[in-house]
Amino acid sequence: MVDLQNHLQSANSLVGLLLPVVKDLYLFAIIVGVGLLFAIGFLLGEERGRLNTEAHRIKKLALFATIAWIVTTVGGVLTELVNLLDGSFRDALNLSTLSTFLTSTSIGRDYLFQILMGIGAVALVARSRKVGAIYFALALTMLALLVPLFQSHASSAGNHGLAIGSLIFHVGAVSLWVGGVIGLISISPHERSGSISRFSALAFWAAIVVGISGIANAWTRLNFWAGWQSRYGLLVVIKVALFLLLVAVGARHRRFIAAKVEGTKQTFRLLVNESLVMISAVAIGGWLSTTLPPISAAGIKAASDPSIGITGIAMPAAPTFSRVLTAYSPDGTILGFILLITALYICGVVVLTRRGDTWPVGRTVAFAVAVALVDFATSGGIGVYAHFAFSYHMLAHMILGMIAPIGFVLAAPVTLALRTLPLGRTPQERGIRGTLITVIHSRYSVIITNPIIALGLFDGSLFLLYMTPLFGKLMQSHSGHILMDIHFLLAGYLFFYVIVGIDPNPRKIPHIVRIIVLFAAMSVHAFFSIALLSTTTLTDGGYFASLHRPWNAQLLADQHVGASLGWMMGEIPILIALIATFIQWMRDDSREAKRIDRAADRAAAMGEEDELTKYNKYLSTLARGDLEHPD
C-alpha cells in the first residue's frame, strides 16, 4: 500500500514537472511560427503581393513550426487531463473522457480552439502563394495564442479587467518581438540586411508595450510586499532582469543599424545572443503561467464579494452624477487598444508635420473626443455601472455604437495612414501602404461596404443580441463584454463610414441611397426600442438578478429605461448623419456645377462647344427624327 502511494506521488510530481515543460514547448513553437510568418509578411520583399523565392523557403519552416505547436497543444491536452484525473495517459486517451474535456470545460475548449486555429493556419500556409494568405495565417496564430489568456490566472484575480488586458498586450508584444528576432535569424543575409531597420522600429514599440503591460500585470497580482517574497514574485523579478537585459541588447543593436553595419557577422551574433535571452524570458513566462500567484488583497476581496467574482468589479454605491463622472475601473483590453491607436494617430500627425504638410485640427479633435468617449463607456463611470444595470449598459452601447464611431469616421484614420505609411523598397513591392490600398479595393471591402450589409450589422445585430439568450451568455464573462464592445464599435464605424465617411471608399454610393438607408436605420432602431419597451420578461438570462444589487432593484423597469435611452440616443446620431449627408450632397452638386462651368469656359476659349451645347444639339437631333418619322 505504501509502495502504491509512493508511486502515485511520484507520478503526480512527474506530471507537475511535465506541465511547464509542455507549456514552454508550445510557447516556443507558436512564437517561432509567429516570427516566421511575420518575417514573410512584413520583413521580406514581395512582388505585387506574391511571395518571392526566399519567402517560399521560410514558408516551409513556418509550416513545420505551425504543425509543431499543434502537436505540443495536443500534448498539453493529454498532460492537463492526466493532471486533472490524477491517473495515467491511458486514461486520458479514452475518447469519451477526451471529448468531454474538450467540449465541456473552459480549459478544454481553449485547447480545442488552439487546435482548430492551428489547422486553419496550416491550411493557409501550405496553399499560400500571396502575402494575403500569410496575413490571415498570422492572425489565426495570434488568436490561438491570445484568446486562451481570458481563462488564465489573471481572470480569477481582483482587477481582472486590467490583469487580462495587460496580459494580452504583454504576450502579444513579446511574441512579435521574440518571433521577429527568430525570423531575422532565419532569413538569408542578403534579405536580412534590408529588414533589420524595419524590425528595429517594431522592436522599439514592442519593448514599450512589454514594459508597461508587464508592470500593470505584476501590480494586479503582487500589489503588496509579501507577494514579492513568493516563488511567483521571484519569477517576476527574474523576468524583469531579463527584460532590462533585452532592452540593453536592443539599444546596442540600434547603434549597429545607425552605423550601417546591419549585414555583418557581428549583427548576426548579436541577434543570436538576443534570441537566447528572449528564449530564457519566454521559458520563465511559461513557468509563470503554470504557477499560481499569491492571493493579493484584491483577490481576498474578490473571494468575499460575489459581484467581483461575476463582474471583476466591486459593487458600486447607488449611481449619482458625481459617482458616474468619477468612477473608474480600467478595462485593460480596450484601454490598451485605444492607447495603441492614439499613439499611432499621433505619430501619423507628427510625420506629416515634420514633412511640412498639414492635417486639419478638427480631425484630430474628433479623434480625441471619440477616444475619450470609448474610455468613458468602457473603463469610466458608464462602463463601471454598465456591469450592474441594463440602463447603463444601454448607455454604453449607444456611446460605443452610435456616437464614438462618428468621431472616428470624421478623424479620417485611413487617409492619415495612406499619407504616412512607408512605400515598398522596390517598385515591385507594395509595402504596407500598397497593402492597405489593396485591402480597401478588394472584393471583401466591396461586399462589406454594401449599405444593406452595413445596415444589417448595425441594426440587425440588435435583435440577435437582445432578443435571444445571447445577451445573457455574453454578460457572464469578461470576454463576452469585450466581444460586445468591439462589435458595437466596428459595426458603428462601418455604418457611418459608408454613410458619411471621408476616407476612401471602394463604393460610390449615391446620396439618395444614403438617405434612404438612414431613414431605414432610424425606423429599424425605433422598432427595436419599442419591442424592448414592450417586453414583460428580462432579456439578460438572470445575470443582473445574480448580482443582488442593493439599489434600483426593479430590474424590468430598469430594462424599460434602457430601451427608452437607447431610442433617444440612437435617433439623434442618425439624425445628425442625415443632416451631414444633405450637406455633402449640396457640396457635391456645387462642385459639379463649378466643374461644368470651368469646362464650358475652357471650351469657349478654344472655340469648341461645351458639354451642355453638345447635349442640346443631341436632343434637337432626336426631336427632328421624331418629326420626320412619326408613329
Image: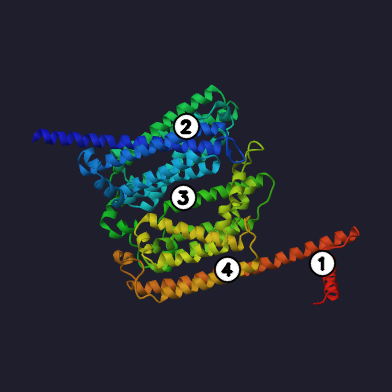
Tell which circle, 2 or 3, labels the residue nearer the N-terminal end.
Answer: 2
Give the amino acid type for the residue marked by disc 2 in the picture: Ile
Read off the residue under disc 1: 615
Classify 10 Å Cα crowding around label 2: few (below 14), some (14-19), many (20 and above): many
Give the amino acid type for the residue marked by disc 3 in the picture: Gly
- The answer to the question of whether label 2 and label 4 lie on touching residues, with beta carbons closer than 8 A, is no
Query: SS of the residue at dot 4?
Result: helix
Tell which circle, 4 or 3, labels the residue nearer the N-terminal end.
Answer: 3
Classify 10 Å Cα crowding around label 4: few (below 14), some (14-19), many (20 and above): some
Tell which circle, 4 or 1, labels the residue nearer the N-terminal end.
Answer: 4
In this rendering, would 240 be left or right of 99?
Answer: right
Read off the residue under disc 2: 182
Q: Residue 397, image x and y in percent?
A: 46, 64
Q: Is residue 582 above or below residue 36?
A: below
Mark 2 or 3, closer to the camera: 2
Q: Residue 77, image x and y in percent?
A: 30, 42
Tell which circle, 2 or 4, labels the residue nearer the N-terminal end.
Answer: 2
Query: SS of the residue at dot 3?
Result: helix
Find the distance from the CA under tag 1 to the CA under tag 2. 66 Å
Mark 4 or 1, closer to the camera: 1
Location of the C terminus by quadrant is: bottom right
Mark 1 or 2, closer to the camera: 1
Find the distance from the CA under tag 4 to the CA under tag 3. 34 Å
Q: Is residue 499 above or below residue 235?
A: below
Read off the residue under disc 3: 336
Mark 1 or 3, closer to the camera: 1
Q: Residue furthest top?
A: 265
Q: Give the residue displayed 34% in from the left and 50% down from the top.
A: 155
Q: Give the residue displayed 64% in from the left and 56% down from the top.
A: 361
Give the amino acid type for the residue marked by disc 4 in the picture: Val
Read off the residue under disc 4: 517
Find the distance from the CA under tag 2 to the CA under tag 3. 26 Å
